[in-house]
Amino acid sequence: MDAAGRFVVSFLDGVHDAPANGPELPARAAEEFGTPPAEHAGRFDELLATFGDAGRYALETAGPRFFAYIPTGGLPSAAIAELLARAVNRQTALAWAAPGLVAMEEGVLRWLCAEFGLPAGSGGVITTGASMGTLSAVVAARHHHLGQAFGDGTVYVTEHTHFCVAKAARIAGIAPENMRVVPTTRDLRMDVAAAARVIAADRAAGRRPFLIVGTAGSTATGTVDPLPDIAALARREDLWLHVDAAYGGFFQLTERGRDRLAGIASADSITLDPHKSLFQPHGTGVLLVRDPGALRAAHVDEAPYLHDLGTTDVPPNYGDLGAELTREFRGLRLWLPLHLHGVAAFRDALDEKLDLAAHAYDELRRVPEVHLPLRPELSTVVFRHVAGDEATRRLLDRINSSGRVLLSSTSLDGHTVIRMCVLSHRSHAEHVDEALDVIRRCVTRVPTAPAGRPRTRSGGRTRQGE
Ligand SMILES: *Cc1c(COP(=O)(O)O)cnc(C)c1O
């Protein structure tokens, strides 16, 4: 335990100045790291050294200059919570087995429901990420509106909706041809009037619209859909409204964020990713639902080998609210940092990210070679080289091969754009300013005529999202 503690302290001391991107993993090393366990006992110091070494071949996602994809912080207090929860190792699928711990987890969920303006009686479940929460939400929507005969049920998204929604729908048995990609307006938001027309056409053809998805902070640009208008449409059409707030959700803790996310309180379900905008370690998502009964009805089951278990109606059985049965005490990961640092610390940190993104936008507007198609709504700034896509890609390669910062790209209106997403709790003004310096330095050196482009580890990683 002491050696592991020393390792963690030394890692955290070094992470502030670590390179943004580790070395390429040599094939020989991959073989060595993948050695199967031996019959004889190993030595902890050697095994810890192997872990430390293997971890170096990686994007420095924990570092302060990671602005690619959606940065995920990883609060040390959450890691300590994890150690405690795992060592005590309670089962929290069935509240009866550890009602005190489930009550702690419920306290966090109740606080979240209140922050998002969901009514008394709402609830949720802590998942491993937004994709798993989305799957449960889609299954609940399908079960609630369509029952078992759902072959003609249709779903409404836009091209900027995260692909986890289409994936969840596919897994939930919704045919890909029943997914409707509604047009967006010029500012990348769902065109709600167009959505109404598509829904009417589907009804006229005998299909059964049941689910519409609004995004509160798109992965690519942080754009927020017009949630009040989508909510009004959902009410009129009797659709389940799911809001994907995996990236943007926790900005709700700030005054500016609440303004931008207005309307989210009308959702039937909301997915959040504490491992993004609440600085938690990877593997922490949340699904909030207006009616936990609908979530339970879609997932609950029983078996004779569970008959000896006691029952308790409050707090809920998380095993009834999703695909998982056995689950760790996930709640401590949120509970400890929130209670230890206080909610205000999170509000302040998120306000700081909004300020930093606005600052980056203002500074980049002064660079003549750079075009910024959008003002950031949350903490993501997108820009491209005025000389075109090839120059933009070369600029990104140059920025990333600096080894100091890491940015990523996406495609917008058929053009390549570079994304800078400020979200780690470790990213402060000095790190954003360093990134801006790197961008300014690289932009003047980008040849705008075709030439050989340097390859970097991130060169091939142009996929949207994480
Ligand atoms: C990251 C993200 C997801 C997927 O969440 P996971 O936690 O990676 O499963 C869904 N929606 C949005 C908007 C995201 O940014």
Image: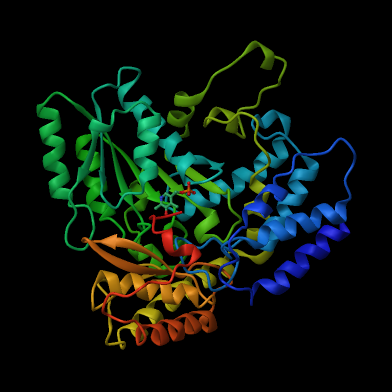
Instruction: Determine whether 253 is above or below 448 in the image.
Output: above
Q: Give the x, y percent position of residue 139.
A: 40, 30
| Residue nearest the viewer, comparing 247 with 21 | 21
State whether residue 383 appears in this view. no
Q: Give the x, y percent position of residue 173.
A: 35, 26
Residue 463: quarter of image: bottom left
Residue at horizontal 14 percent and vertical 23 percent from the top: 206
Q: Give the x, y percent position of residue 404.
A: 54, 77
Question: From this viewpoint, which residue is outermost toward the top?
Answer: 304
State whether residue 310 appears in this view. yes
Residue at horizontal 61 percent and vertical 58 percent from the top: 25
Instruction: Determine whether 177 is above or below 206 in the image.
Output: below
Q: Give the x, y percent position of residue 264.
A: 35, 52
Viewed as shown, does residue 88 lie left or right of 386? right
Residue at horizontal 64 percent and vertical 46 percent from the top: 331
Residue at horizontal 40 percent and vertical 83 percent from the top: 442
Viewed as shown, does residue 58 lie left or right of 434? right
| Residue nearest the viewer, comparing 423 with 265 | 423
Viewed as shown, does residue 143 lie left or right of 284? left
Q: Quadrant of the N terminus?
A: bottom right
| Residue nearest the viewer, comparing 73 with 33 | 33
